[in-house]
Image (cartoon, rainbow, N blue to C red):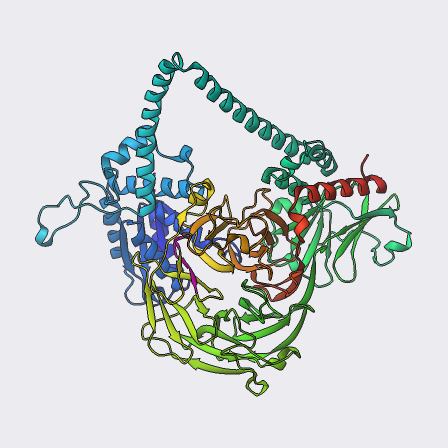
Amino acid sequence: MGYVFVSYSRRQSAAADTLIDWMERNGIAVWKDTASMPAGVAWRRQVTEAIRGADLVVMCVSRLWYGSRACRDEEHWAAHYHRPQVRIPVDEGRFDPARAVAAIQAAWAAVTPEDRLAGELETAAGDWANRGGRSRDLARGRALKAYRRAFGGSARGPRGSRQGTRGGGAATAAPRPITSVAARYLTQSIRRGVILRVLAALAAIAIVCAGVSGVTFATRMRQIDAANTQANEESRRWDALRDALDESPYKAMETVLAQPHDAATMRGSMFVATMRMVLAAHVPDDYGDATDPRFSGYDFPDALDTRRPDALADAGVSAATIAKTRGYAVSPDGLEVAALGGADVRILDARRGDTLMTLTGANLTKVTSMAWSEDGSALAVRSSDGKATVWKVRAGTTIVKNTGSWFMDGAALGGVGGASGNGSRAALLARDGRVTLVDTAKGRVVSDAVRVPVDVGVAIATAPDATDTAVVAGTKDGNTVLYRVAFGGDASGADGAGGAGDAGDAGDAGKATRIEVPDGCAPGAIAVLPGGREIAIGCGAQIDVIGMRGGGPSRTIVNDAGADVTALRADGEGRLFVGFDGGTLAVVEAGSSTLIRPDAAASDVGSVGICLGGTARAVAVSGSKALFVGDGTPAQLCSRGVSRSRTGDGGANGVDAARRDKDPWTMHIGMTDFASLTDAHQSRAVAAAPDGSAFAAGLSDGSVMFARYDMQPGPLVREIPGEVRVVVYAPDGKRVVAATRDGVIYTVVAPDAGEYEGATLRRQVQERLDRARKLGLAR
């Protein structure tokens, strides 16, 4: 049974509720976005998937509806997926329930089997793309026969689709299109069926040939058996690790330490992932007699506080979680709440109720009180047996300031080397247009006096060599505007000598100069080219390169596919790296007006399907490699790399090994959470280390994820709540400044080169187990 998707303005929900009530009474299922989703939840993904599979889209149109970006996006997606639609006017004085019901009834009756089959195909294709384009998810059997019969295996659409003709003439058999993803899914499904039939024939031939070339056949079979044995062994190890984690974090440590650890094994991604999974368990850092002086900094109350804190009143904590909680303790800064359960302590985001981390590794049945350290970096519990247990809750992060601002975007000033996203200062743009400057080396705010005259700040960008100026995009009186902002060299107490195009004059500090944009352009994604004299702005499906004073474009780069520009970044040589709505990536060489679409790396299976449909939101460039991050799927955070290296990683030695200017641009897999440590579905911030050896990305669940240049996974730090909107490396590469949508600015310790090596991680696991044994927490 299908369903109807209803698109409406929340301010006119009464009319929508009337129509929904009628449909539900008449047995028509309705998908309605009624939840007020917190920041970080992939609303776009959920709504897109709902529209993709809907049999009918009902649009409650009005002035408010046409003025809503979300509603217009829903209209766009309905058209993109070719779903049957009906428009119902709901403005005051125009809404007629009887006529509206009649229109919906007629539209519902007109939905054909081909319409429903198209919805099934689009849904199956979307699931296939979201799961990485795996062959096992392709269509087969009766479903494939039905798709082929209706759509013919081409992207043009179903045969015999009904379309009305003028004057009430006979319906024609004009084809109706399906999306490119659905067409690719159908093509791959058909191709898979053909390949399987060919393989069956080849297998029969191989059996015959085996008598002639038995030695070759036997050798190949031994290779296959060896590969299967290795795969089975790896699967067995994963299962053993999961079982051990369910039993105890210390049992998990013993399990991974018992695994083979020769040099070749420790270089493998699986070995690194297992070590990271174990290290992600939050076990006590100290344990002992509560009267010991080392616990004197914790002000333990006489008893557990069982009252639910006011901070969690609107956080959406589940009833099951509340029922299992025996006591609460709010952090000194109010950002987090410790909730004591039966066997663990959960650290909750005080605003949203999400679990940031789970503290385990100790017997908590006798706990009588909980207390935070004065700075909120550690939590301690005291038990009735007189023992105290301490966990470091913020082991790698330090809060710089809780500003209360709504940060939207950020950029780096005073960058080092050719990598993007690092500098001596981070410029953080708030929704109200205020720009906060942070000294990245010292981890302190140096200025928050600059205010750009916009109603809503949207994006900020700096040239790769900028020290004192940035470009800000925002809205003013309903129109999109651009400003050049000069901060002045003394904003950080540093030398004011700026690069080309920079202000360099302290007298210009805080000055915002309006930049005229081409008619009809509403730039969202922006990038400043080296020298600071030109800006690349995303204008729908094209990029206009304009001067710093505005006016007509000096060149225009058009995306013939029609997808909107969603991410832009310029490197030190003037190249542009571009991300489009729907997941397409492209490179524009310096001075060119041509989009180069990278090929997928033939040796990198994951690069082809892991992020299909995942819209890019941010880009960082390091030498000949660009890392894109953006909207992902329930199975995987979306991240892809574009490189001029034949292997995609440039080797483990950094940027220089990857520079081959004559090589084609190739797309590779990007950051990947092999250890399954995050549920984040989106990233809107990414930066490259000053020496080009690593990347850092800020995720929608408050995590900061690191990866080496070759995409070897690094640590994932989730210690501060909120959706990360900005990450900027300090000049020495030892820390990252991050800022959240909730206005919290903090620093994160960046991993050194050794922390990407399996041998180092194994040593850390051994040290942690030895400490637990010394404290008496493990045998």
**Residue 276 magenta-highlighted:** no
Q: Classify residue 183 as left or right of residue 132.
A: left
Q: Give the quadrant of the C terminus.
A: top right
Is residue 582 covered in magenta? yes
Residue 71, placed above or below residue 84:
below
Judge left or right: residue 584 versus residue 376: left
The image shows residue 516 at horizontal and vertical percentages of 38, 79
Image quarter where the N terminus lies is: top left
Q: Position of residue 252 (x, y in %)?
A: 70, 35
Q: Is residue 312 left or right of residue 23?
A: right
Q: Is residue 119 visible?
A: no
Q: Residue furthest bottom?
A: 507
Which residue appears at 84% of the width and 42% of the height? 775
At a point 54% along the width and 46% down the height, the residue shown is 672
- Name the image quarter holding residue 497: bottom right
Q: Nearer the viewer, residue 67 or 481?
A: 481
Q: Residue at x 23, y 34 (%)?
A: 149
Q: Quadrant of residue 765?
A: top right
Q: Is residue 440 visible?
A: yes
Q: Nearer the viewer, residue 677 or 607?
A: 607
As drawn, the residue found furthest toward the top would be: 211
Question: Could you say which is closer to the camera, residue 6 or residue 414?
Answer: 414
355 horizontally vs 644: left or right? right
User: Where residue 443 sits: x, y (%)?
Assistant: 68, 68
Q: Is residue 583 above or below residue 70?
A: above
Q: How many numbered dots are placed on residues in this image?
A: 0
- Place of residue 556 in the rendered image (x, y in percent of width and height, measured from the top left): 33, 68
**Region in magenta:** 575-585
